Amino acid sequence: MKFEDLDIKLIVIVFILSFFLLLVGQQVYKRYGIDKPLLEDIKQKSYIKNAEIEKFADGVNIKVKLKKIESLKDCYKDLDKTVYKYLKNKPYEITIINDKGYLQSLYEDKIKFFLFEAQKTGEYVKMKDSLDQISKKYDLKIKIEIDTDMNLYLIMEKDNEAFYEILFSKEK
């Protein structure tokens, strides 16, 4: 059989069909070989109330809603390690979803400025004093954690409501 004997249309059709099958196979692998096991692994964690994966052209966003926790820093580090295990060096972001309510508005109106200021100036003692005053004034529990990269992990609780926020000192 010579090359001239092959029908060029048949070659093109086989090539397109093969390419299409490879793309479909890649998508199936991503969905059932990475995304589904990752989501199941995240949802099995004791501190996760709900989780979902949102894909973008430039990366993945893992959205999580947390149960009441004692240490946001420890939970975030554990979650980050789990996500990294599946996604390796692919770009991803972990977003904590909070209920809109009293603590969210208090954070937006009063607290976030102290956190940003402390990260920029390094005056963490001043920030802690300001947060203690707000905690007493509004009768709520505020816990702040700082890691070695100077990221701030904030937990606010009042009654049955909880609010979590992470301020990274630099881009990941």
Image: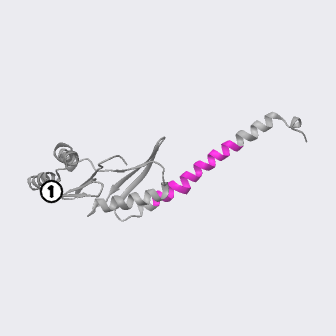
Work out which quarter of the rendered image holds the N terminus and state it: top right
Residue located 32% across and 47% down the image = 170
Residue located 68% across and 42% down the image = 19
Q: In the rendered view, how is the structure colored?
A: one colour
Residue located 71% across and 39% down the image = 16
Up-down: is 172 above or below 15? Answer: below
Observer-nearest residue: 43 or 33?
33
Q: Splitting the image into 4 quarters, where does residue 128 fall?
A: bottom left
How many residues crowd around disc 1 within 10 Å: few (fewer than 14), some, or many (20 or more)? some
Left or right, residue 89 beside residue 161: right
* Span shown in magenta: 18-40
The prevailing secondary structure element of the residues shown in magenta is helix
User: Residue 62 location in percent, x, y?
Assistant: 41, 51
Left or right, residue 27 beside residue 11: left
Up-down: is 156 above or below 58? Answer: below
Left or right, residue 66 beside residue 40: left
Q: How many marks?
A: 1
Single out the residue that lies furthest toward the right. 1
Disc 1 residue type? Leu
User: Residue 5 location in percent, x, y?
Assistant: 89, 36
Q: Splitting the image into 4 quarters, where does residue 81 fall?
A: bottom left
User: Residue 158 location in percent, x, y?
Assistant: 18, 57
Q: Is residue 112 magenta?
A: no
Q: Which residue is mark 1?
A: 140
User: Residue 39 location in percent, x, y?
Assistant: 46, 57
Observer-nearest residue: 93 or 37?
93
